[in-house]
Image: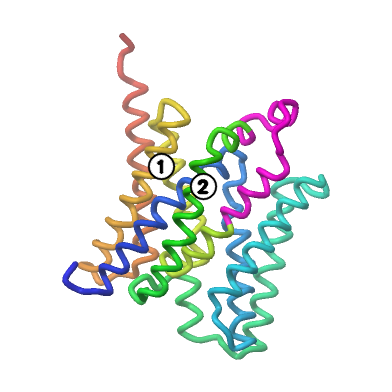
Amino acid sequence: MLDLEFMRLAFAAGAIVGVLAPVVGFFLVQRELSLIGDGIGHVAFAGVAFGYLLGTSPVWTALAAAVVGAAAIEWLRAQRRAAGDQALAVVFYTGIAGGVVLISAAGALNVNLFAYLFGSILTVTRRDLLLIAILGLGALLVVAVLMRTLIAVVLDEEGARVNGLPVAAINGLISMLGAITVGIAMRVVGILLIAALMVLPVIAAQRVAWSLRSTMGIGVVLGLASVLAGLTISYYGNLPPGGTIVLTAAGGVLLATLGSGVRARLPVR
């Protein structure tokens, strides 16, 4: 399998996204905004459609649209104009409706569009990998530098504000990290499935973790394992990679839930 260059590129791109997605998803889950990836993803779909309409690269227009969508969600939530779920709903439906209209106007309802919706990791080029590496590693570096501040804000927003932390800026940064993750993960699992890769490993980790640090660590391990195992299964089983990766992550949630149930029944020493 690894003798093929397209598989080596796929594993490299998948490994970066498999690490980044649970890291960003950790903060979204802690903020009870697990579905923000879906909202941003649907706005990114409108960005892809806009790219086809302009005749330019859909990757850049989708990334720009994802950033705008993330900013809109955070602005609506921060201004108390709408609760978190309502802000997501507004952006979610606006994005998908705008995408449908733009795709129809561009006449781009074809196989290439579905590659962005459901992923096309096996077609990742060296140029794509370079972009994914730069944005992904840059986002991970930001998280590493601001880890304490990010955790303080997502755990106790009011307490962080009292202590003088820039809560609004940090919340905006988390949303931007979500937008970047959606933008670079389009080629791995697709716009419609990226939210699952951001959230499912974290949910599984919460079932078995014993601290916040262990939750993030286990989530990263599960996210990376889901991508690598999903790619391998899809190659030998001739299955779609994006869906196989997400189903593997869902299997991790099931196993973690069963494991936590067994542990809860063991006698306490």
Query: Foreground residue, 126 or 237?
Result: 126
Q: Residue at x 36, y 37 (%)?
A: 256
Instruction: Inspect the image, locate mark 1, and give the three-letter code of the amino acid beneath it.
Output: Gly
Q: Marks 2 and 1, Cα distance to the nearest angstrom?
A: 9 Å
Residue 236 lies left or right of residue 137; in this view the side is left
Q: Residues within 10 Å of mark 2 (few under 14, many from 20)?
A: many
Q: Residues within 10 Å of mark 1 (few under 14, many from 20)?
A: many
Specify the quadrant that holds the C terminus: top left
Q: Residue at x 46, y 41 (%)?
A: 203
Q: Which residue is mark 1?
A: 219
Q: State which quadrant residue 38 falls in.
A: bottom right
The secondary element bearing badge 2 is classed as helix
Label whose residue precedes the other's in the sequence (2 or 1): 2
How many labels were placed on the picture?
2
Residue 133 lies left or right of residue 235; in this view the side is right
Instruction: Inspect the image, locate mark 2, and give the three-letter code of the amino acid beneath it.
Output: Gly
Residue 123 lies left or right of residue 144; in this view the side is left
Query: Foreground residue, 180 or 203?
Result: 180
User: Residue 214 magenta-drawn?
Assistant: no
In percent of width and height, residue 177 lies at: 57, 53
The secondary element bearing badge 1 is classed as helix
Q: Which residue is mark 2?
A: 25
- Give the main secondary structure, helix, strand or loop, of the magenta stretch: helix
Judge whether 192 appears above or below 258 on screen: below
Q: In the rendered structure, which segment of residues is drawn in magenta?
A: 153-178
Q: Residue at x 32, y 67 (%)?
A: 10
